[in-house]
Structures are given as structure tokens and as C-alpha cells.
Amino acid sequence: EPEVTQTPSHQVTQMGQEVILRCVPISNHLYFYWYRQILGQKVEFLVSFYNNEISEKSEIFDDQFSVERPDGSNFTLKIRSTKLEDSAMYFCASSELLRITDTQYFGPGTRLTVL
Amino acid sequence: GEDVEQSLFLSVREGDSSVINCTYTDSSSTYLYWYKQEPGAGLQLLTYIFSNMDMKQDQRLTVLLNKKDKHLSLRIADTQTGDSAIYFCAETPSGTYKYIFGTGTRLKVLA
């Protein structure tokens, strides 16, 4: 069964450094999402992306964050200058179309630790 | 505001039924979802229900929806130790395609 994959599974970085989290969505999916889950807290929506544009973003997704689809398979989340509070599990998701009936399928997550 | 609430913990004995409850916020949410998160793993879709349904059954899982009270529940029949995980409900409020997740319920199944 096709699945969303994410790399790396765990990233450790120093505060102020840039990180790029990578995702490979399911191949025929057109809509992509990033969510994050701070330890012990809710899963929170960050951003959705379609046709090389951001469709929707939350207030968490400030100028430090950016997303990109650099080629036909990868979808990346970049954090320009990491802060301690960016430490979280980051989940990528994809859906086939943007209909309310289209379920989002989640990857296993990347655990980001900012020291 | 967007706040989906769940009880934090539930403990049941193996073989019993588990009922996990969720209160959501947007009465116009079209679909409501249940996801399972095992330790160290991602979010696995368990089931979903369309808002014009009251109940949906899928093998050991039964979803009940009370739109009037904005209450969603997930019943797991014959709960097994492998069902131990965190269960999240999620809604998609009108006018958006993002998921709003609940706080998660940690289910512990005792042998």
C-alpha cells in the first residue's frame, strides 16, 4: 500500500541553524500538508500546499518557515533559524484531491530537537 | 474557537469494550475522523464518518455521531493489547481543508 515517507526520522540541530525536513507524498496525490506536535500537546496544522502555492497557513507558520516542492516527488519544510520552541514532531500529509471527502494520509514524522 | 476536546486517559481490560469520546466545535464540519498513534509512530487513519450519518461500523470499530451535541465517540469491541495507543479525533471545519485535532486519548489495555 502506498505511504507517505519522511526523512530524517530524527534531526538534532543548534538554535539558530536552518533545517530542512523532507517528505515524499503518495505519488498520485496533489495536496500536501505539514503539521507539528509539540511533546504532550495536540497535533497542529501548519500549512497546506497545492500547485506550487500555499493554500492555507496557520499563525504558527511565520516568516521563519517555508515550503517547497523542489521536484516531482519531494515536499520540504524549511525552518530558517530554529528556536528552542520549534522542537516537535513534524508530520507531512498528502491527499489525492482537495475535496472534503479526500482523507489526508500522514507520514511517520520527523522528530526535531533544537538545542 | 477551534478546540476539539477529548478525555486524556482510558484504561480497560483485554476483551472489554473501549469507548473514546470527543467533543468538536464546528457543527458544519462535514467529515470527522479517528486516527491512532502508536508509540514513536505517525498517525494512522482508523475510520471516518460523514456528518449526515449517526453511526458507522467497521469490524471492531463503531463510530457514533451526535450532531446536536457535537459529540463523537469511538467504540472498540474486544479490545486487545495491540490497541494500546493514543487516539485522536479530528474535524475539518467549513471553509477549510485543514484538520483540527483533539487533545488525544491515551488508551491502555491491561492483560
Image (cartoon, helix red, strand yellow):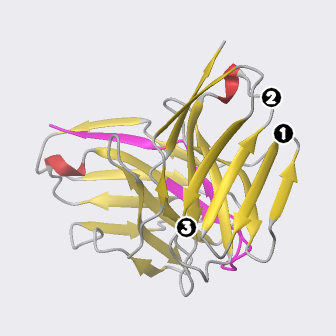
Task: Describe the element under mark 3 as helix, strand or loop.
Answer: strand
Q: Which mark is residue B60?
A: 1
**Quadrant of the rendered structure where residue B53 is?**
bottom right
Say which quarter of the image contains residue A31: bottom right
Q: What residue type is labelled 1?
A: Arg
- Residue B31 visible, this angle: yes
Question: Where in the figure is residue A52, as x and y percent of width and height?
Answer: 50, 79
Q: How crowded is mark 2: few (under 14 residues within 10 Å), some or many (20 or more)?
A: some
Residues in magenta?
A92-115
Q: What residue do we see at 75% from left, 58% from top?
A: B64
Q: Residue B78 carries which label?
A: 2
Same chain for the residues at labels 2 and 3, yes or no?
no
Marks 2 and 3: CB-CB under 8 Å? no
Which of pointers 1 and 2 lies earlier in the amino acid sequence? 1
> Which residue is at 23% across, 51% downward?
A86
Please indicate whether residue B42 sits to the left or right of residue B52 in the image.
Answer: left
Cα–Cα span, label 1 and label 3: 31 Å
Give the Cα separation between the discs numbered 2 and 3.
36 Å
* B52 lies left or right of A4: right
Name the front one of labels 1 and 3: 1
Q: Could you give the CA–CA distance between mark 1 and mark 2, rounded to whole angstroms?
A: 7 Å
